Each structure stands twice: as structure tokens, then as C-alpha cells.
């Protein structure tokens, strides 16, 4: 380390004074100037995700559309992604709701928006909650989205910033909000999706966020959008889903290079198909394999480590709109059909899946 030394200290006005700071020294800025405290390691922590062996997935809340009353749920389950087995109770959201968005840093999980009522009294919500992923316990209030929304809000993040996109409020919207995950407060406007939609699969690399497939109300779409998470602005067209040309409410998850889109409902017979894209490129999706369930599966929650992708819960088409508690997993770097992982603690359609080892964390 270099040392700064003064050979002599003299009074102002001396011919040997060198550089003289005489009078008031000002910094021309509209803000106050504060010196940083703490050591460099504390100010610039390691933002890498948790390693694949210990990465944890969380699935929060529930809401199921249908002809009979199915109240929303505030239940949060967790799993260790590298293992197999049933979900374990983590705690509760501050408000019972489902089909909102969720994202995470290596430390925090965040749940935003969702539907707070049974089918007879639906209600979009703007609440954002957060939890500490490595622990267990109930969620705490983070702040609010700029627009109350539900029915499959897309969400993605890098290590510091989370983005929430689309949904219904009650009209279908194209709004994107962002938050700084390590803080609390009100979300800020990010920009707009290429089209207004809900029922979106979403995931990220450390650079890009992806929003794929959707319901336009009443039509479906196979559009895939992308954003650069660290900036703000409108989304760009990435390509199209290949098999899911008429789908709504698929689930999504990713490692840092490949993203998976799974499930959903639609007019075809291909809604248990899993597709994938390479996030750093542009283009249409490619077939990966199938989920373990053969029927339609809307709003499954997605979570991932650098190795595995997991899809949990969901519900099928009418007339019963029955929910399931099935958890499936795949190895992201390969292709092939999903394998049974275990079951959630309750049957539900959540769309609220996150992890502390996902692709946005590197």
C-alpha cells in the first residue's frame, strides 16, 4: 500500500506551501456527499448464486380458477433442488394470493402481485413480500408494484434487480416494473412488453430476462420477449415458441445459459411439452421433452439450480379445473422427459417459484 507523506507543514502564504487549499472547497452536485464505510469486501459482496448441491427452491401462494370456490393460499413450500422428496413448509406470505410473480437474489426471495380471492370475488393485488431463502419463517412486507396485477405475472432477476411483467389488473397489461432486491420500497417503471399479456413463463441469465408465451385474453400467443435487466426500456422480440402456439400459463426456469418453458393450457394436445432456448441468442424454441403428467398444466411454479430445473403444481382445464401437487425435475443441459421429484404440501397452482441458485445469478 502506498503512503502519502508531507515533508513539511507550513502556514498559508508561505513561499514553500506547495498546493494551497484556501477558503471553502465545494463539490458541485445536487446531493450530499457521504464517505463510504466498511471494508471493500462488505461493500462489494459476492453476488454468485448458491452452488447446485445446496440451492433451495421456494413455491409460494396459490390461486385456482374454476366454477367452484377455491380460496387463495398463503403457503410457502421449499425443497433442496439437488435431492428428491416432498415439499416442506417454509412459512406464509403476508397475504393469501396466487399467480403472481417471484424472483430472487442469492439471499432473498421476493413475491409480487397475485389474485387474492376465490373465483366469485377475484382481486388483483400489488403487494410485494420477501423472505430470506436460507432460513424458514413468514414473509415480510417489501413494498408495492406500480400496478396491481395477477393471472401469471412474469418475473425474472439478476443478483440485484428484479423485474415483474404483464398480468391482468383486471385488463391485460404490458407493464414492467423493477425493484432492487436487497432494499425495500415501491417498484419503479422499467418499460413495456412488446404486447400486453398474462400467463407468462419467465427466467433469466445474469444479463437477460425472458418472457415467453401468454394469454392475450381471449387469444393466445407464442411470442418470446427479452430485456437487458440492468437497464430500463421496452422489451424486444426474441422469437417464438415452437410447439406451444396456443398456450397460456406455462412455467419457466433456467440456468445461466438455457431457459425452459413447460406446461400451460391451450387448444392443442401438446401442453405437457417442455421447450428450451439459449438465452444469449435469438430464435425460436426447441423441443426438450415432456412433463410427467399427460394433461394440461397451467401455472406451475418453476425453480432451478445450475444443473436442475424443477416445475411444481399447476391446474388443468375444465370442467373441474383440478389442481395437482406434483413436482417434476429435469437436467437442464440435456434433453428428455421429466422425472418425478415429489409432491407439494398442498395441491395448488402457484406460478410463484424461485431459487437462490437460478440462472440470473451466474
Image (cartoon, helix red, strand yellow):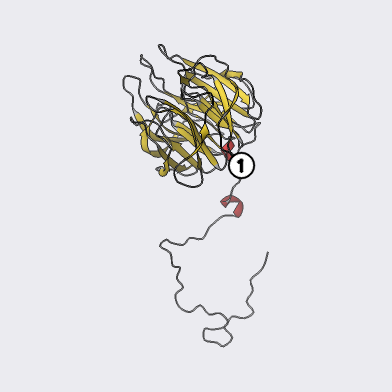
Q: Is residue 357 above or below residue 338?
A: below
Q: In which quarter of the image is residue 293?
A: top right
For numbered disc 1, what is the local secondary structure?
loop
**Percent position of residue 250, x then y:** 49, 25
Instruction: Report the residue at 57% width, 41% height from top.
Output: 206
Q: Residue furthest left?
A: 121
Q: In which quarter of the image is the C terminus?
A: top right
Q: In which quarter of the image is the N terminus?
A: bottom right
**Percent position of residue 81, x then y:** 61, 27
Residue 361 visible in the picture? yes
Q: Which residue lies furthest to the top in this view?
A: 319
Q: Which residue lies furthest to the right in this view?
A: 1
Please indicate whether residue 145 sits to the left or right of residue 46 in the image. left
Instruction: Report the residue at 43% width, 30% height from top.
Output: 100
Q: Which residue position holds label 1?
A: 48
Instruction: Report the residue at 51% width, 60% height from top.
Output: 35
Q: Which residue lies furthest to the bottom in this view?
A: 15
**Percent position of residue 189, x then y:** 40, 44
- Front position in the image: 287 or 47: 287
Count of labels in the image: 1
Q: In which quarter of the image is residue 19?
A: bottom right
Q: Quadrant of residue 166?
A: top left
Please indicate whether residue 234 sits to the left or right of residue 241 in the image. left
> Mark 1: few, some, or many residues within 10 Å (few <14, many ≥20)?
some
Residue 109 visible in the picture? no
**Percent position of residue 263, x then y:** 52, 22
Amino acid at each position: 500500500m502506498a503512503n502519502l507523506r508531507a515533508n513539511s507543514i507550513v502556514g498559508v502564504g508561505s513561499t514553500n506551501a506547495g498546493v494551497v487549499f484556501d477558503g471553502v472547497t465545494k463539490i458541485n452536485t445536487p446531493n450530499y456527499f457521504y464517505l463510504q464505510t466498511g471494508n471493500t469486501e462488505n461493500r462489494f459482496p459476492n453476488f454468485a448464486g448458491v452452488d447446485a448441491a445446496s440451492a433451495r427452491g421456494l413455491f409460494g401462494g396459490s390461486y385456482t380458477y374454476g366454477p367452484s370456490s377455491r380460496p387463495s393460499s398463503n403457503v410457502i413450500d421449499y425443497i433442496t433442488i439437488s435431492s428428491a422428496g416432498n415439499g416442506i413448509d417454509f412459512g406464509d406470505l403476508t397475504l393469501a394470493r396466487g399467480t403472481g410473480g417471484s424472483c430472487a437474489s442469492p439471499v432473498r426471495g421476493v413475491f409480487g402481485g397475485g389474485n387474492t380471492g376465490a373465483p366469485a370475488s377475484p382481486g388483483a393485488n400489488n403487494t410485494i413480500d420477501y423472505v430470506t431463502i436460507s432460513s424458514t419463517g413468514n414473509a415480510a412486507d417489501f413494498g408495492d408494484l406500480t400496478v396491481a396485477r395477477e393471472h401469471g405475472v412474469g418475473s425474472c432477476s439478476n443478483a440485484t434487480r428484479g423485474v415483474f411483467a404483464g398480468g391482468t389488473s383486471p385488463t391485460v397489461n404490458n407493464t414492467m416494473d423493477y425493484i432492487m432486491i436487497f432494499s425495500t420500497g415501491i417498484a419503479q417503471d422499467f418499460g413495456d412488453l412488446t404486447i400486453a399479456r398474462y400467463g407468462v413463463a419467465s427466467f433469466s441469465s445474469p444479463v437477460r430476462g425472458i418472457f415467453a408465451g401468454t394469454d392475450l385474453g381471449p387469444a393466445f400467443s407464442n411470442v418470446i420477449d427479452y430485456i437487458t435487466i440492468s437497464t430500463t426500456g421496452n422489451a424486444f422480440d426474441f422469437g417464438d415458441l415452437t410447439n406451444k402456439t396456443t398456450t397460456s400459463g406455462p412455467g419457466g426456469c433456467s440456468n445461466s445459459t438455457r431457459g425452459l418453458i413447460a406446461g400451460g393450457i391451450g387448444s392443442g394436445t401438446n401442453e405437457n411439452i417442455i421447450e428450451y432456448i439459449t438465452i444469449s441468442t435469438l430464435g425460436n424454441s426447441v423441443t426438450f421433452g415432456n412433463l410427467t403428467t399427460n394433461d394440461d398444466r397451467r401455472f406451475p411454479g418453476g425453480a432451478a439450480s445450475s444443473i436442475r430445473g424443477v416445475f411444481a403444481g399447476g391446474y388443468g382445464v375444465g370442467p373441474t379445473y383440478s389442481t395437482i401437487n406434483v413436482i417434476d425435475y429435469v437436467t437442464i443441459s440435456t434433453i428428455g422427459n421429466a422425472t418425478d421429484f415429489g409432491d407439494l404440501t398442498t395441491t395448488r397452482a402457484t406460478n410463484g417459484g424461485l431459487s437462490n441458485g437460478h440462472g440470473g445469478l451466474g
